[in-house]
Amino acid sequence: MSAKFRKLNEAGIAAFRDYIRDGAEGPPPLHLLENPETSAPLKPDIQPGSGQFDDRYMFGVYLNSLLKESDPAAISGDAGLWSALALYWFDRLCPPDAGGNRTPKQEYLYVLSSDYRHYYRHLVRSPWQLVKDHSDASRFLLISPRKQAHPLSVHGEILEQFGGRQQVLASRPIIKAANKLYFDKQKSRPRTGVAGNGRGSARRFGLILRQLDLTYDPECMTDSAFIGILPDEFEKWRKQMEAGQSKAS
């Protein structure tokens, strides 16, 4: 790799997209990041490292440090930057199996899409955005309920349930309340069952929120007040939250 990290230009994005569509055979085409025909200079300069990340939350913390000199508004929709970072970390995002074969998932997980239905699913941009917006309250969205062999490669069911409504994902009070309700600080993971379809699950949270929006304005409420107005199906999670707070005190 060259001393200065470069982002992909349109030709580079197209070549990276072709690599994914062809089944990601062989090693990632990192040469695209150095070739001036497929890349462009990046300002301010960054130099990604090769450190290990236990989960997507820690990845997001690292990305915010890496990009701290960049204007968030300017880079948020920069497909060349996010796609370049996905290419750089492709071995983590789409790891090969024992035989050296990869199974790439949807293209928009690696190449940033402009479609509002997909861009929040990008495996590099999403951790950066969520940690930037919500700090440690984003943990329940970025850490899997179960230990993953390749944590950076998984978008996550909890994030999928919340990400479908961008106004929810952008709401600091709602995300803070949901993290307080669903994240087990003692285990440093979301509580068991949050990602399922049962009563009070993340899927139900979004549906109930639509009903509460008719009467309440979560943006004007404290996280505790918001948790308090959730219906009885969330009582299980409230009790677990209170039990965790008692242990911590």
Image (tube, grey):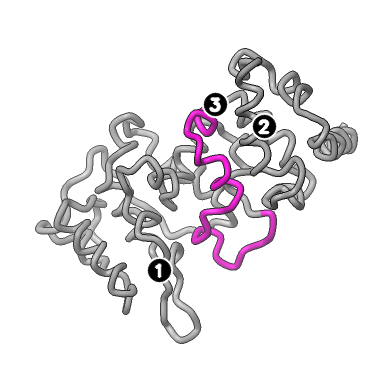
Towards the viewer: 129 or 232: 232
Q: Earlier in the sequence, mark 3 or mark 1?
A: 1
Examine the rendered structure and indicate whether residue 27 appears above or below residue 116. Answer: below
The three-letter code of the residue at mark 2 reads Ile
How far apart are labels 1 and 2 at the CA level? 34 Å
The three-letter code of the residue at mark 1 reads Pro
Q: Start and end of the magenta stretch? A: 145-171
Q: Is residue 66 magenta?
A: no
Under circle 2, the secondary element is helix
Q: Position of residue 105 (x, y in %)?
A: 42, 65
Q: Is residue 148 magenta?
A: yes
* Residue at the spot of label 3: 171
| Drawn side of residue 234 relative to residue 33, left or right | right
Q: Earlier in the sequence, mark 1 or mark 2?
A: 1
Image point (27%, 69%), residue name: 19
Towards the viewer: 52 or 195: 195
Image point (39%, 35%), residue name: 68
Label placed on residue 104: 1
Examine the rendered structure and indicate whether residue 195 appears above or below residue 146. Answer: above
Q: Position of residue 97 (x, y in %)?
A: 48, 79
Under circle 3, the secondary element is loop
Image point (54%, 56%), residue name: 53
Towards the viewer: 123 or 38: 123
Foreground tag (1 vs 2): 2
